[in-house]
Image (cartoon, grey):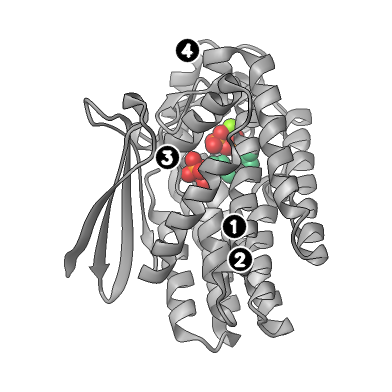
Amino acid sequence: MKTCLQQFSLSFSKKPRLQLCSALIYTIEDCLTLQVCFFANGQNKKKAMSITYPIPQHILHDLEKVEKELVNSVKSSNGLLTEACLITLKAGGKRLRPALVLMAGMVGDYDLDTLLPIAVASELIHMASLIHDDVLDNALTRRGVATINATWGEQAAIAVGDFVFSRAFEILSRTDTYMIEVMVKAALDLSLGEFDQMATARVIDQSLADYLQKARRKTAALFAACCEAGSYLSGAKAYEVNALTSYGENLGIAFQIYDDVLDIIGGEATGKAAGVDILDGTVTVPILCALEQLGPKSRLAEIVSLEKPSDEDVKTALEIIYNCGAIDKSKDIARSYVDLAINELKIISKPDAVSVFEGIGRFVIERYH
Ligand code: IPE
Ligand code: IPE
Ligand code: MG
Ligand code: MG
């Protein structure tokens, strides 16, 4: 049964095109679900992004504080820099990483003041990596709006990303030494993963294991760090912190595989253009599954190896992947990582926290954005 509990609007900015974020809180089978719709244009109420995943009401409330801190953190003396950051921030996004930090805090003694800086820094690291990733991937749309590289050019996007990374580390520098270590390690892994991915673009004879190492680095490391940080800072027992870290890593792998699936089947709701991975020659799980079936001499293999595939090539590749059963296989692989993640939760003694983490697991493989 789906019941709407509360509806509210948050005004982020006086600028009309970035005005509104409305949120609905639902209960579905005793679970609170947050659905936030961000509007890129306050006048026309054009929906840019929405999120739906289970979240306890007190975490939802605290995420609003994270949001305010995020907005403050990207302000600087440079108007253009501030504007570019705020456009990316206010265009939406699921805020999954700060949500994970806060939710992991439920495993021990939850204290927002301790968790807040890490939650903010986690989203800033993520945001900076997206800004740079869009340069690397030549992506023109993110969160339903034009990317910084599309609007201001690649040089500006690199500089904005550097600023956002620096802000994250400035915030982290005021926290626990071990937390700095955990988050810095995740940021290092992220850049190594992105670099490995660039170095192996258009290489069709790579294995699932090769892929998984990249996904672990570029995506799962930050998920794991968020879960580790939240549980560690809440004083959870060492075995609980380890279990949550492992949950985060497996969840992150599933998340990246499902993101790859969305690159093939995703619609407008993703806020990103489809087929970017094919265009860039990024060999993702759906591509690997399709290549396994069709072989290295297939038309798909030929397109993935092309330096500059045409729009028609990309369309053909998407159809081939879609029609050969690779999507279902990829979803199964993603599901197996969610199962591994959820399996880690057995030793967590707080049922509230466990059910929230299970819900996030389901969300990751059922989402459409
Ligand atoms: C996109 O992450 C990049 C990946 C790691 C696949 P998200 O899908 O969490 O992006 P936002 O923050 O919701 O836009
Ligand atoms: C994740 O990979 C990128 C980062 C971890 C920064 P993708 O390149 O697949 O992410 P999207 O699809 O652009 O969001
Ligand atoms: Mg990308
Ligand atoms: Mg992607």
Mark 4 and mark 3: span between their CA atoms?
A: 28 Å
Q: Residue 119 bears which disc, if any?
A: 1
Look at the numbered disc 3 and give the secondary structure of its residue.
loop
In this view of the protein, can residue 132 be seen by the observer?
A: yes
Q: Secondary structure at mark 2?
A: helix
Q: Which residue in the structure is indicated by mark 3?
A: 92
Q: Residue at x 34, y 31 (%)?
A: 268
Neighbourhood count class around disc 1 (C-alpha, 10 Å): few under 14, some 14–19, many 20 upward = many
Q: CA distance from mark 3 to mark 1?
A: 16 Å
Determine whether label 2 and label 1 are within 8 Å by CB: yes
Task: Specify the amino acid type for callout 3.
Answer: Gly
Depth-wise, is mark 4 or mark 1 nearer the camera? Answer: 1
Residue that badge 2 annotates: 115
Rendered view: 109 above or below 40: below
Is 297 displayed left or right of 336 in the figure? right
At which x and y percent is residue 330?
51, 49
Percent position of residue 313, x then y: 50, 15
Ligand 1 within 8 Å, label 2 CB: no
Label 2 and label 4: CA atoms lie apart by: 45 Å
Disc 4 under 8 Å from ligand 3? The reply is: no
Relative height, residue 294 to residue 80 (above, below): below
The amino acid pointed to by label 2 is Leu
**Residue 269 occupies which quadrant of the picture?**
top left
Quarter occupied by the N terminus: bottom left
Few, some or many residues within 10 Å of mark 4 (<14, 14–19, 20+) = few
Q: Amino acid at mark 4?
A: Asp
- The residue under label 4 is 311
